[in-house]
Each structure stands twice: as C-alpha cells, then as structure tokens.
Amino acid sequence: MSPDMTRSVRRVTLTQFLIQRQHAGKINADLRLLIETVARACKAISTRVNKGALADGHGSAGTENVQGEVQKKLDVLSNEILLEANEWGGNLAALASEEMELPRPIPTQFPKGEYLLLFDPLDGSSNIDVNISVGTIFSALRCPKAASGELCEANEAAFLQAGRRQVAAGFAVYGPTTVLVLTVGDGAHGFTLDRESYTFVLTHPDIRIPEDTAEFAINMSNQRRWEAPVKRYIDECLAGKDGPRGKDFNMRWVASMVADVFRVLSRGGIFMYPRDAKYKDGRLRLMYEANPMSFIVEQAGGAATDGATRILDLQPRGLHQRVAVILGSKNEVDRVTGYHQ
Ligand code: F6P
C-alpha cells in the first residue's frame, strides 16, 4: 500500500477531531480539555459497565438520589468517576449531576475555570442488571461573568441558562459497542471506542436525521394518562395504512434515552416522553437529559419540543426540573407540536 493510500484509510481520533476544531477557532483549549476529560471518564465507566456482575457492579447502592430514586451501585460509581476526572483540570467553575442535589464547587486546592459541566452519569440505569444499553449524558455551559468581569459564583443560579446557550453536549452509549456522540455547535458527530487502542475513533461524521420516519418510541404503558394531542398522534400511527397517515409505523422502546436517541440519530424516528396525568411536568430532566439531547438532535437536522416550545428556548427554573420531550425526525416532531396547538 502506498503511503498516500495508508493516509486515506487512517481514522480520525477524538483528540485529532478536537484539535482541528480548536485550530479552526470553534473551541478553546479549556473546552477541548473538558470534552477529552469527559470522554476519558466515559471509557472508565464503559469498562465498569462491561464487567457487570464480575466487578460487583450490579444491584442497589442502598441510597436514594435527590429525585427519591434508588441509586444503583454503578450510578454512584459513575458519578464519582466523572467528579474525580473533572475537578482538578482548571477549566471548570463547578459541576452538577443528576445524582447530586446541589452543584459541586471546585475544591479550593484546584484552580477554577470558566465552564460549568452537567451530567447524568448513568442514564437508563434500571437496565444495568438486565444487560441492556445504558449511557452517560453531558452538557457544558459558560459560567456567566459577574458585572465586575470576575468569574461568577458557581451556585445553582449560574447553571439555570436556556439550552441554546450550551457550548458542547454529548452522550456515550454503552451497548454492543461504546459510542460517543458529540456536538460543539457545528454538527453532530459519533465516535466508536476502539477497545484495542482505547481510543474514540470518528465513525459517524456529520450525522443527519431523516426528516420523515415511520418509527416511534414511547412507553405505551402510560397511554391512558396521556394528553389528547399525544393520544391522537399515536392512534394515527397505530392505524397505519388504514388510518389518516396512510402508512404503517413500527415501534421501539429501549427505556434508555441514550439508546433510543442513538437509534433516532442513526435511522430517524420520533422519541417521546410526554407529560401525562402522573408526570405532570414530564419525566425526563431538562438540564441533564432534554437540553443536551435536543442540542445534538437539532445539530443533526432534527427538532425537539415540549409540545409547545422548542426545548432549547425553555428558561430553566431549577437544576432538577422535569420536562416533556418530543424529539427526532423534523416533520413528525412538527406534526405532534402542531397537534398541541
Ligand atoms: O430518565 C431515565 C430513563 O431511564 C430514560 O433513559 C428513559 O428514556 C426513561 O427513563 C424510561 O422511562 P420508563 O421506565 O418510564 O419507560
């Protein structure tokens, strides 16, 4: 093989991809460090998830998180891995996790930076013990500067910024392969973990979600509690060729948002966790799930709303706020949003 041919098949690693973005002025060195550090933590989490029962990773940790949900051992461990990896780099002002009630300031012995990092350390954790894909979701914001130009106090208020102000977002799926999907605002790109070189390699550049789809994802067991617009939409899908849509639809529900959204990114589809009579504000978390996923989906040409409003335009009221989520193929999301109006 000639040297030129070798070059043409060489894969781009996450580090190379980020350095290219840095040289192009899209991200600075601190944001690159943030993303690389989160990716490194995801590799460590992937290894632990992969070991499963061999590493005593299954079962409950015997504690509850701020939402009153029982924490799994791997929830707690993944949270610790992400905190330890990120707190000393000098690029963060504070961290917030779905598993912690309050933001975690940077310990005083370490320098502080301008970024805020939010994460859901192990999304879909009810699937851990049954060997179904789980994942990590993250979002990065800039810490707003105080009037004096000093770095802001990194309290809860600093985090409460609309999703459109995210500077980066991503998620890892720990499935048959570990895949990291990332956006820094110029498209959505996927990287597969090569377990031999322990490197994330660009395998899904410039992901595009088809605008039309015949596949929906929703937890059908909540059907009796849905609002009328969602009922109407799903009824029409179920009626298939015989109904107003004139085509058959397929249904998928993994119950791990990371896996369901990765499928939508890969081949299109609509993912919904609407508000209902039980979850009056919706079930998913705005800051840890809906905002980062909506940023990625929009960057891939899809859409994301809560039924009425673009998710990225919602002004957060609390760090652990829940929200209704309808995202994926643009024409289907527009249709459901239209039904709400
Ligand atoms: O928020 C956690 C989560 O596990 C998501 O990843 C997933 O989409 C959803 O909850 C599943 O909810 P349910 O168990 O109600 O189907």
Image: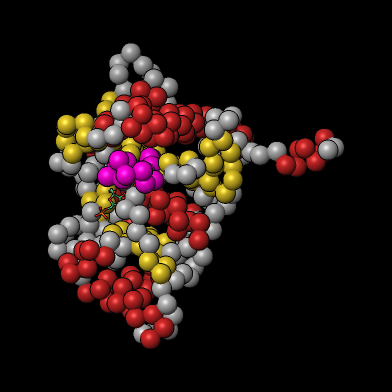
Residue furthest to the right in view is: 2
Q: How many marks?
A: 0
Residue 84's x, y, as percent? 35, 23
Q: Is residue 58 left or right of residue 304?
A: left
Give the magenta-colored segment's residue range: 125-139
User: Would residue 227 appear left or right of 338 to someone viewing this image?
Assistant: left
Give coordinates of residue 239: x percent, y percent: 34, 81
Q: Is residue 26 left or right of 142 when viewed as pictured? A: right
Q: Quadrant of residue 340?
A: bottom left
Question: In the figure, residue 249 lies in which quadrant?
Answer: bottom left
Which quadrant would the N terminus be assigned to in this image? top right
- Does the magenta-highlighted stretch encompass residue 264? no
Residue 238 vertical placement versus 95 (above, below): below
Relative depth, front residue between 162 and 229: 229
Q: Residue at x 33, y 70 (%)?
A: 337
The residue that appears at 59% across and 29% down in the rendered structure is: 197
Q: Position of residue 167 (x, y in %)?
A: 44, 42
Q: Nearer the viewer, residue 86 or 61?
A: 61
- At 54% across and 54% down in the image, what residue appears? 207
- Res 185 visible: yes
When the figure is inspected, residue 259 is found, relative to residue 193, above or below; the finding is below
The stretch drawn in magenta includes residue 127: yes
Work out whether residue 24 or residue 83 is closer to the camera in this orientation and state it: 83
Tell me the quarter of the image containing the C terminus: bottom left
Which coloring applies here?
A: secondary structure
Which x, y percent locates residue 264? 45, 58
